[in-house]
Amino acid sequence: MPCALRPFVLGCERHPEGLSALVRSPAPTPSRRRPHRRRVRSHLSRGRLSDARGTGVLVPAPRWEVDDEPRLGVSHVLGRMGDAPRRGMMAREHLHARADGAWRDPRAVAMLWPDASGIDERLLRHRTRGRFWETLAETAVTLLVTREYEHLLVALHAGATEPIVSYLPLPHPSGIAVDRLRGVVHVASTRNPNQVHDLVPAVAAPRDVGEPPVRLAARPLVPVRTRMLPGGTYLHDLAMVGGVLHGNAVGKNAVVRLEDDGTATPVWWPRCVERRGGARLDRNYLQLNSIAAGATVRDSFFSASADVVGRVRPGDPAFRVDRRGVIFSGRTREPVVRGLTRPHSARLRREALWVDNSGYGEVGICHGGRLEPVARPGGWTRGLAFAGGVLFVGTSHVLPRFRQYAPGLDPDRCTCGVHALDAKTGRTLGSLVWPTGNQVFAVEAVPSAWTAGLPIVLGRRRSEWERGLFYGFVTE
């Protein structure tokens, strides 16, 4: 055989042995028959061939097509059912099954949070120092504590035989207010949109679905209503003023009256936000964040991180806070206390005005326009409640992005916990510390006979009891 010929001499061979076979185009594939090669496309324009690994980004990939007539396939064979309807049915049934199984967990429904059962209880493991539980028992109170960045409302109860820690997951809880006349606990959530949760004691409930209700000695607080407000309200502290629920609308530099229909009506703001044409209630300028509730709004006091509207606003690392915090009088709308650093949790007790000076880790009484510190319990102070002669104060870690807001603290030595102090001397009676905790916002004391806490008890898996509680709880 002669050696292979170059294409341009084909047809010019001198020897018949070297003649090439007649070149013919392949027979077209019948449109009703699968082509002899799988995944081959025909009728392609010149220069437009592309596949999943090709470079023609504007040409769609074949994506497993086996014919240029995709409308014809197995489903057209007599006696056969196409795969596409079966796959569609399976996908639909799967979607329906997922939807049918959703929102079956009572915790998720009660808290409007699908992952409410996913709370890691290591966040609630604690250590105590001194006579913390004994002090709680002697004062006969249950403490309610909001752990805002861990999204937990926590209850601390001394118990008859052992201490009880219980909780409810809530989105970024902040202020707490107790309506003692109506027997309702209000809790603010500061995420977008804001929420106000109403909780009341459950006095009876079945042990499981279908069983008769039995009396509940613990009277756990259960949610019975949630109100939504615009996220720009930026609710922080809550307080009962004149028997009506009020809150700090930090995003509006104002105090708002929270109506039963879900509206928030501004009723007070400091004079410094007023300009020609009205008050500047459009955004946060002052970090107006706590209420020392009096009989009326005019008899109340309100803490803020500043009393001047500037170009740099709260939340900006350049916002200056050291010694610039104030407490406004509800009557004059002017500062009556100065020299504070990020004040929180202002409270009136027997005509004395108390406040947490968070940036220096202090709690004290305001006198003569200045703070007289009573104690430094060991952290960013926030949360303040009284029970008899005992003062309960919350402490938190300093958030790394806000270290400049705590010039008087060593962030590495701060703790997250609650401390029982002698209100006269400031002596620490006992402390409960969460080693893995982060931030405490509010502390509120309620009579332990009124409630022992919340439905979910640390360390106890009682799914049947929780299911029965939420299925058939009875309130007063």
Image (tube, grey):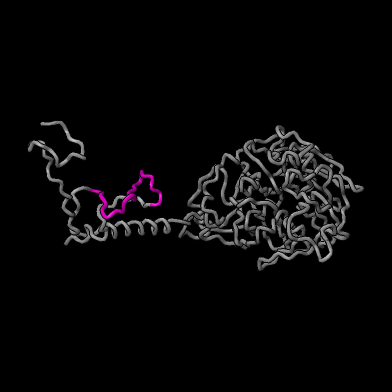
In the foreground, 467 or 44:
44
Q: Which x, y percent locates residue 173?
A: 65, 51
Image quadrant containing the N terminus: top left
| Magenta span contains residue 43 | yes
Magenta highlight: main SS: loop
* Picture coordinates of residue 5, whole percent (x, y): 18, 35
Point out residue 445 in the picture as x, y percentages from the top left corner.
Answer: 71, 50
* Residue 262, placed above or below residue 325: below
Query: Picture coordinates of residue 384 (x, y %)?
Result: 75, 47
Magenta stretch encompasses residue 194:
no
Residue 216 or 443: which is nearer the viewer?
443
Specify the quadrant that holds the C terminus: bottom right
Residue 250's image quarter? bottom right
* Residue 398 picture quarter: top right
Please, which residue is most extreme toward the left here? 16
Magenta region: which residues? 38-58
Mark yes or no: residue 196 visible: no
Horizontal side, residue 384 vs residue 28: left or right:
right
